[in-house]
């Protein structure tokens, strides 16, 4: 099993493949060379081939019926039995992403304030004023959630010595679960967030 261990090395020029805000000490000492600019956005490693990160969606087994629980467990067993490539699963502890909700509420707030500027009816204006307060409170709540509430997620790390072989590993990982166990693609930004957390001694993956 390949594991991403910290290594003490001088800064690699390929760290420039990350944005300036992401070029921190963790890049210098990590085994990561760059995130490739291809469709899959694989992670090229300094000493061992390539890595892909996929997210495994969790299920609340307590909310499922007995037959559904058995089907889920059997499908996971089939996946583990058939999928024999180089892989491991880690859990993350990432901040909750509320950007979409905040952006929507801010659009609503802008529309509300536009109506307030154009409103000539006192009763309507008071209603809009109440709506403005509700939206401001909602935005503040979402901002607080983003800062304080963290999600536990399951991330599948897939390894292969070449891009072509990793393509095949990813294909198998996403097809051996009979639809019940289907690792999902994740964004480049989230990959950077996960890799930073993994390689930061003060903020390890669990």
Image (spheres, helix red, strand yellow):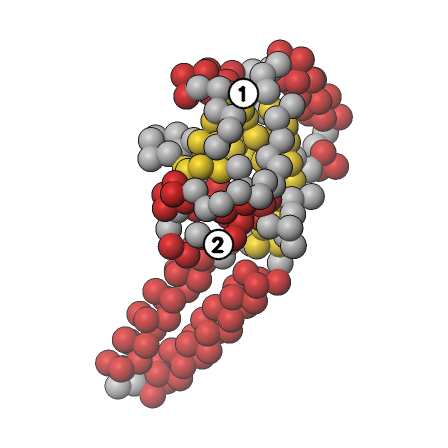
Residue 43: % across, % down: 45, 33
Residue 160 on image: x %, y %: 51, 20
At x 69%, y 17%, the residue is: 77
- Name the one closer to the observer, 131 or 49: 49
Q: Residue furthest bottom?
A: 122
What is the count of numbered marks? 2
Residue marked by disc 2: 24
Q: Quadrant of residue 75?
A: top right
Earlier in the chain: of badge 1 and badge 2, it is 2
Which residue is situated farthest in the front direction here? 10
- Out of 153 and 64, give the one closest to the viewer: 153
Picture coordinates of residue 64, whole percent (x, y): 70, 32
Q: Is residue 84 left or right of residue 11?
A: right
- Reading the image, the residue beneath label 1 is 173
Residue 57 quadrant: top right
Is 144 rendered above or below residue 23? below
Q: CA distance from mark 1 to mark 2?
A: 32 Å
Q: Residue at x 57, y 63 (%)?
A: 147
Residue drawn at (62%, 58%), measured in percent from left and top? 149
| Residue 115, numbered circle | none
């Amino acid at each position: 099993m390949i594991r991403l261990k910290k290594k003490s090395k001088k800064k690699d020029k390929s760290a420039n493949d990350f944005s300036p805000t992401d070029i921190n000490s963790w890049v210098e000492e990590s085994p990561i060379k760059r995130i490739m600019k291809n469709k899959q956005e694989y992670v090229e490693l300094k000493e061992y081939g390539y890595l892909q990160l996929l997210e495994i969606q969790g299920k609340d087994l307590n909310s499922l019926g007995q037959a559904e629980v058995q089907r889920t467990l059997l499908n996971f067993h089939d996946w583990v039995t058939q999928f024999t490539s180089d892989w491991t699963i880690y859990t993350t502890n990432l901040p909750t992403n509320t950007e979409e909700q905040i952006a929507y509420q801010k659009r609503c707030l802008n529309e509300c304030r536009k109506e307030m500027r154009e409103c000539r009816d006192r009763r309507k204006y008071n209603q809009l004023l109440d709506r403005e307060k509700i939206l401001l409170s909602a935005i503040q709540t979402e901002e607080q959630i983003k800062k304080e509430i963290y999600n536990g997620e399951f991330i599948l790390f897939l390894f292969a010595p070449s891009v072509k072989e990793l393509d095949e590993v990813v294909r198998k990982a996403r097809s051996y679960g009979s639809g019940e166990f289907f690792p999902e693609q994740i964004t480049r930004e989230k990959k950077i967030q996960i890799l930073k957390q993994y390689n930061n001694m003060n903020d390890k993956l669990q």
